[in-house]
Image (cartoon, rainbow, N blue to C red):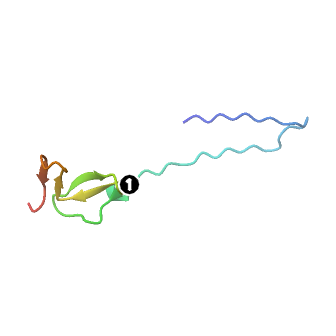
């Protein structure tokens, strides 16, 4: 990541001190640590599904569509 800075000074002495801090990115070490994941209902065989209402990914053992044409059941094995 490149950092570019332009410093303008209105005095002949110029700026006395310039400091740039680059924020460090801390990567999540586990899936459960991600901010957009709700894993409150973890079960064996759970599948990951996006929930638009909460704007998060959730875990469920059964995933169905509103049309009823798609059904996965990954639980109890």
- Quarter of the image where the C terminus is located: bottom left
- Quarter of the image where the N terminus is located: top right
9 to the left or right of 38? right
Q: Position of residue 29 (x, y in %)?
A: 37, 54
Q: Residues within 10 Å of mark 1 (few under 14, many from 20)?
A: some
Identify the residue at horizontal 13%, vertical 51% (top origin): 72
Query: In the rendered image of this protein, does residue 3 appear above or below residue 29?
Result: above
- Look at mark 1 in the image and give the residue it sits on: 36
**Most extreme residue toward the bottom, as rendered?**
40
**Looking at this view, is 51 or 4 the one in front?**
51
**Most extreme residue toward the front, as rendered?**
67
Total count of labels:
1
Task: Give SS at disc 1.
Answer: loop
**Looking at this view, is 57 or 5 the one in front?**
57
Identify the residue at horizontal 47%, vertical 51% (top origin): 26
Query: In the rendered image of this protein, does residue 54 appear above or below residue 24?
Result: below
Q: Position of residue 52 (x, y in %)?
A: 33, 52
**Looking at this view, is 45 or 24 the one in front?**
45
Identify the residue at horizontal 85%, vertical 37% (top origin): 14
- Quarter-of-image position of residue 4: top right
- Quarter-of-image position of residue 45: bottom left
33 to the left or right of 50? right
Identify the residue at horizontal 19%, vertical 64% (top origin): 43
- Quarter-of-image position of residue 6: top right
17 to the left or right of 43? right
Q: Where is residue 15 in the image (x, y as percent from the top left)?
A: 83, 41
62 to the left or right of 20? left
């Amino acid at each position: 990541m490149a950092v570019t800075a332009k410093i303008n000074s209105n005095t002949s002495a110029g700026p006395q001190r310039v400091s740039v801090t680059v924020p460090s990115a801390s990567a999540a070490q586990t899936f459960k640590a991600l901010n957009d994941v709700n894993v409150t209902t973890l079960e064996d065989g759970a599948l990951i599904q996006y929930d638009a209402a909460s704007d998060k990914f959730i875990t469920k053992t059964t995933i169905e569509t509103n049309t009823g044409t798609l059904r996965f059941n990954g639980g109890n094995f």
